[in-house]
Image (cartoon, rainbow, N blue to C red):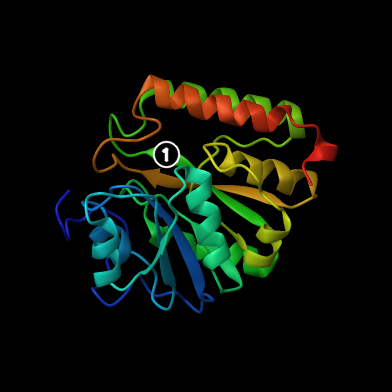
Amino acid sequence: MGEGEPRGGPERGLSGGPAGGGSPPADVVLPCLDEAEALPWVLDRIPPGWRAIVVDNGSTDGSAEIAARLGARVVAEPRRGFGAACHTGLRAAEEEFVCFCDCDGSLDPALLVPMVASVRSGAADLVVGRRRPTARGAWPPHARVGNAAVARMLRRRTGLRLGDIGPLRAARRAALLGLALTDRRSGYPLQMVVRAADAGWRISEVDVPYAPRSGRSKVTGTWRGTWTAVRDMRAVLRTPSEETR
């Protein structure tokens, strides 16, 4: 994907995303490891009035410099791990509402506007995007199988019926910090959902388009990466509910 190449979704100009319709400002946490190719498109999709927080997790391709040049706040997290990057971004956030989005061009940050609106209205405390592939190869079979297995385990553990443990999500910053998340690897997104469910949060799921990512995935692109993620998530699910807080 080249700089400025369209990926679908609402049209927008260089100055910001589609009209927010009165949406409150939010911080968007973007964990980043060598995403120089996708960053221009992702940052151009951040809704107007919102702030992108790019958490550089040890990139060697100039991702941090590109993000800074494009106006994002760049925070360094030297400890490798998806959860480490996400939590550093959460701690760096300042707005009442905080969102999370992958930084590889597979998900459109503009889709976060109605998700934040749902949290603001009180309809939900946490909104998670259920990925719907838009092209063949966007979501490898082994990654889908692993995700489905984790979703079944989540249902048994909490009774929560989610179809995806997706990375696109929105919630209130203070509430997220109150969950005291500890996982710093691939289990972070699941631990967020588990602890939220244990705390009685209203958790909703919305369908979101899922496009082929730019570059090679560090997790779901290989069987080994998928297995590592599933292993991390199983560890989260094995934790008794009384120990999640």
**Where is residue 214, by image quadrant?**
top left
List x then y, in percent, for residue 228.
49, 26
**Where is residue 224, by image quadrant?**
top left
Task: Name the foreground residue: 208 vs 213.
Answer: 213
- The relative height of residue 19 versus residue 105 in the rendered view (above or below) is below
Secondary element under disc 1, as helix, strand or loop, is: strand
Horizontally, residue 45 falls left or right of residue 208, namely left
- The relative height of residue 170 versus residue 174 in the rendered view (above or below) is above
- The relative height of residue 5 versus residue 15 in the rendered view (above or below) is above
- Residue at 32% in and 34% down: 138
Farthest-out residue, front: 78
Whether residue 169 is visible: no
Farthest-out residue, left: 2
List x then y, in percent, for residue 101.
44, 53
- Residue at 66% in and 69% down: 121
- Could you classify mark 1 by the number of other residues whose Cα lies within 10 Å: few (under 14), some (14-19), or many (20 or more)? some
Whether residue 203 is visible: yes
Task: From the image, tell me which residue sits under label 1.
Answer: 132
- The relative height of residue 16 versus residue 223 in the rendered view (above or below) is below
